[in-house]
Image (cartoon, grey):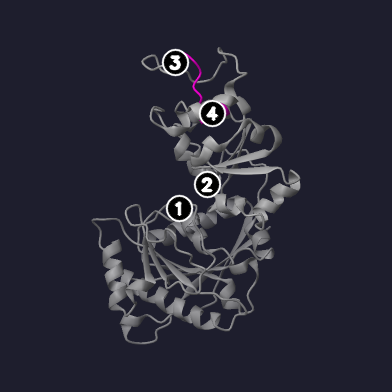
Amino acid sequence: MTVEALKNPRHAYRQVLDDAFTGRVRIFDIGDFQQITPHDIKGNCCVIVGTIQTLRVENTEGRKVYSHNENLEPHFSAVPKKSPGLELIEDDKVGAGTIKFSLANLLHLHRPLMIVDEAHKAVTGLSQTMQQRVNPSAIIEFTATPQRQSNLLHSVTAQELKDAEMIKLPVMLAEHPTWQQAVDGAISKRQELADIATRDTKYIRPIVLFQAQDRGQVATVDVLKDYLIEQGIAEKRIAIATGDQRELDDVNLFDPACDVDFIITVEALKEGWDCSFAYVFCSLANIHSSTDVEQLLGRVLRMPYATRRSDERLNRAYAHLASPRFSEAAMALKDRMVAMGWGWRCCSQQCTCPIHDTGNAAKKDERVFLLIRN
């Protein structure tokens, strides 16, 4: 988690802040805002980590960040009673008409720099109202899929990330006629990569990320899990990550003692999640948005240990698809990349991908996407 990384003095994130502010840094989870003192704000760089959903609400009543909290009174001792932009206590409550001692008002007073991850989804709808409440001095957005009208200050190309050994490229894309064959292909590819990884200098356990279909369709989460078990996959090797089932919570996927090799999701991991051990993405869903394709494929792009591996097969990401729409969306993504200044080359290179339920070792073509900066 970001807040844990920032609190860890040995983590690169925290070290950058410590260097910039000579060690005068305080990190707070947004749920612990009551611990913030005027001294913290006056003498340090204070970083509050939370989700956009915590702040973006239509009705602020009952939300802790907007609620009156006596613990924050010292922050408002010198604030004029008629300060514009600050929320007041409601008419039907004690102290009606006076300034709320709330985190939202505290933020409004200090005009923080707001840093928003996955910004293509965050700054929409009610977030404009949220921005007025928080009153940020500036908003810096991070996203792999910027909106066309975004004010781009800096961009990093996939080639630059690859040169820095941060991501796996190219993406090896295999299409299958049925969802069962796509699953079989993903299982086979994971085992192939796992065998290769045993010869790597560091511990790597390749993981498959499955995107199941929504409820009411054929290849749902439960159907997919049952199919994996039928193929001889032990249940302890399967984790489900959906809105209802959160089996990845408190699981350290990098722990050699961890058994999880297969993760099933629908939408929960589309954004804001990645694991460098995730090598294979298998989609059974009908995805037709190039933005969604870009986000989904991004879940398996991070390079283990941010270091290029000695075996070239561990420097690539793999996708097995059962939906022609996904492929069409991937082609739309290609067109958008070209429009953004990327050259695109679709190579004819092939990799073997045994399809278990055909009863033979048939070979499946895998498209190789190479993004070449012009």
Magenta stretch: give its range. Answer: 97-106
> Where is mark 1, residue-wise?
292
Q: How many marks?
A: 4
Point out residue 206 in the picture as x, y percentages from the top left corner: 49, 73
Q: Residues within 10 Å of mark 2 (few under 14, many from 20)?
A: some
Residue bearing the label numbered 3: 95
Q: Earlier in the sequence, mark 4 or mark 3?
A: 4
Seen as rendered, the residue at the extreme bottom is 360
Calculate the distance from the C-alpha at mark 1 to the C-alpha at mark 3.
48 Å
Kindly identify the amino acid type of the residue bearing the numbered disc 1.
Answer: Asp
The image position of residue 374, as x and y in percent, is 68, 57
In the rendered structure, which disc, 1 or 3, sits on the residue that comes first in sequence?
Answer: 3
Determine if the magenta segment contains residue 99: yes
Residue at mark 2 to residue at mark 1: CA–CA distance = 12 Å
Residue 105, image x and y in percent?
A: 53, 25
For the residue pair 79 and 348, the one nearer the viewer reads as 79
Check if mark 3's residue and mark 2's residue have beta carbons within 8 Å. no
Cα separation, mark 3 vs mark 2, equals 39 Å
Which three-letter amino acid code belongs to the residue tagged 2? Answer: Glu
Q: Are marks 4 and 2 in contact (CB under 8 Å)?
A: no
Query: What label sits on residue 118 in the rendered view?
Result: 2
For discs 3 and 2, the disc positioned in front in the rendered view: 3
